[in-house]
Image: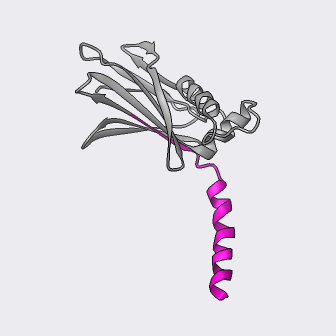
Amino acid sequence: MLRRIALLIALLVAVPVAAHQQKVAISTIALNSRTERIELAHQVPVHDAEHALRFQGAKDPDIIGSAASREAFATYVTRRFRLWVDGELVTPEYVGSEIVGGNLMVYQDMPAPAEAAQFTVNSQILTDLWARQQNRVNIGGGTKVETFVFTVNTAARDFTL
């Protein structure tokens, strides 16, 4: 009996914590040397994504159960994540999305430049909702990863791949 009461209390405390916005999105930009394409992956907590859709006027968004909700949020992500190559704004192709754990993953890719290029990035995903939103952008892969952290007024950052 005491064990059941303890379990009930633990559940009551844990559920509200799980429902809070995480206010952190993680993006990764990496060169796939096999395909000669630059791959982008954006990871956003499902709860945050649904909150953003409500903010945009969607009624009862359901990221997990509705492909339309997932696609609507994926479109939002691709608008709020900006990438420039040699000073020119580019729009990587939208590849798709999926749910992984409690996160919505949004995938994009683009051809790698034929020659060395200067890249510039700015991630403003969800900064229009929360002033405390943090977006981490990991550049590269393996043991050579550089991480930028973007908030509501952070300037774009330069990098090379």
- Tag count: 0
Residue 93 magenta: no
The quadrant holding residue 32 is top left
Please say if 83 is above or below 150: above
Location of residue 27 in the rendering, given as x and y in whole percent from the top left corner? 44, 36
Per the picture, the main secondary structure of the magenta-coloured stretch is helix
Quadrant for the C terminus in the image:
top left
Q: Which residues are magenta?
A: 1-28
Location of residue 51 in the rendering, given as x and y in whole percent from the top left corner? 68, 41
Q: Is residue 130 visible?
A: no
Query: In the displayed structure, does residue 59 sit left or right of residue 154?
Result: right
Instruction: Compare residues 48 and 5 and report the one nearer the observer.
Output: 5
Residue 11 magenta: yes
Please say if 45 is above or below 77: below
Residue drawn at x 62%, y 28% is 72
The quadrant holding residue 46 is top right
In the image, farthest residue toward the bottom: 1
Q: Is residue 52 visible?
A: yes
Location of residue 101 in the rendering, given as x and y in whole percent from the top left corner? 50, 50
Residue drawn at x 24%, y 43% is 143
Location of residue 64 in the rendering, given as x and y in whole percent from the top left corner? 60, 42
Please say if 87 is above or below 36: above
Instruction: Compare residues 2 and 92 and report the one nearer the observer.
Output: 2
Quadrant for the N terminus in the image:
bottom right
Question: Which color scheme is applied?
Answer: one colour
Query: In the displayed structure, does residue 22 sit left or right of residue 37?
Result: right
Residue drawn at x 59%, y 28% is 71
Residue drawn at x 60%, y 27% is 76
